Each structure stands twice: as C-alpha cells, then as structure tokens.
Image (cartoon, helix red, strand yellow):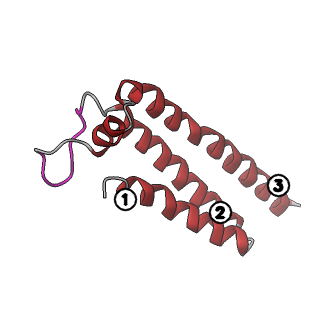
Amino acid sequence: MVYGGSMFQLIFPAVFAWHFARHDQVLGYCFALGWEAASLHNLGRYIADARAQELPLVGNGDRIHDWNEILGRWNLLRWDHVLGGSLSVAGWPLIACCFFMLLGLWKAQRT
C-alpha cells in the first residue's frame, strides 16, 4: 500500500507519453515527458525527506512518511538523500529531450 502513490505518480505520465508517442503527437508527448520529469523531481524530494519528515502530509498528519517506512524496510534509510537526489536529477534528461524535440518541431513548422 505504501508503494502505490509513488508508483502511480510515475506510471500515469509514462502511460500518457506512450499513448502520444504511439499516435505521433509530439506536443502531447513532450507534455507527458515534462509531467514525468516533474513527478521524478517531486518524488525525489519526498524520498530525500524520509528521515527528516519535514514535508507536510496530505490527510492524517500524525503518521510517518511512506518513504521512511519503505527505506526502513529495506535498511536504506541512511541513503535517503542520495536516492532522492538521484531521482530528482533523473528528470533533467527528459526536460532536455523535450526541449530539443520542441525545437525540432518548431524548425520543421517554419520551413
């Protein structure tokens, strides 16, 4: 149950990206990649907060963060900053890909 929110945060934009790529809709594909990059960044921030638990929770505020429980189960809690930071940085290549795809689309439209 603790994995569900994070999984869907990454799965939804990936499904949209797959759909738009299948239908050769570059603008929609770039939007979905940007959404995925933002989700990676936000999830990375949440994972990096696993020990400190300073980010506010939506709903019941007296329970522990999901990633504190997840990383605690796997004995990786001391790596929360490394794992979260890596995930946050993972979105940057997606942003660069979107930029170059949109640039190519714009150049194609001009000719």
Image coordinates for residue 52, horizontal then vertical, percent: 25, 28
**Of the numbered discs in the image, which one, if any, rests on residue 107?**
3
Q: Is residue 65 above or below residue 7?
A: above
Q: Quadrant of the C terminus?
A: bottom right
Q: Is residue 59 above or below residue 85?
A: below
Q: Looking at the picture, tell me which residue is in the foreground, 15 or 1.
A: 1
Query: Residue 58 vs residue 12: left or right?
Result: left
- Three-letter residue code for mark 1: Gly
Which residue is label 2 attached to?
Answer: 29
- Three-letter residue code for mark 2: Tyr
Q: Looking at the picture, tell me which residue is in the foreground, 20 or 87.
A: 87
Q: Residues within 10 Å of mark 3 (few under 14, many from 20)?
A: few
SS label for mark 1: helix
The residue located at (44%, 56%) in the rendering is: 7
Upstream in sequence: badge 2 or badge 3? 2
Image coordinates for residue 34, horizontal then vertical, percent: 56, 52
Q: Residues within 10 Å of mark 1 (few under 14, many from 20)?
A: few
| Image: magenta residue range | 53-61
Q: How far apart are the two marked residues, 2 and 3, measured between alpha carbons?
A: 17 Å
Query: Residue 20 vs residue 70: left or right?
Result: right
**Of the numbered discs in the image, which one, if any, rests on residue 4?**
1
SS label for mark 3: helix
Q: How far apart are the two marked residues, 1 and 3, measured between alpha carbons?
A: 41 Å
Image coordinates for residue 50, horizontal then vertical, percent: 31, 34
The answer to if 58 sits in the magenta stretch is yes
In this view, the mark in front (2 or 1):
1
SS label for mark 2: helix
The answer to if 12 sits in the magenta stretch is no
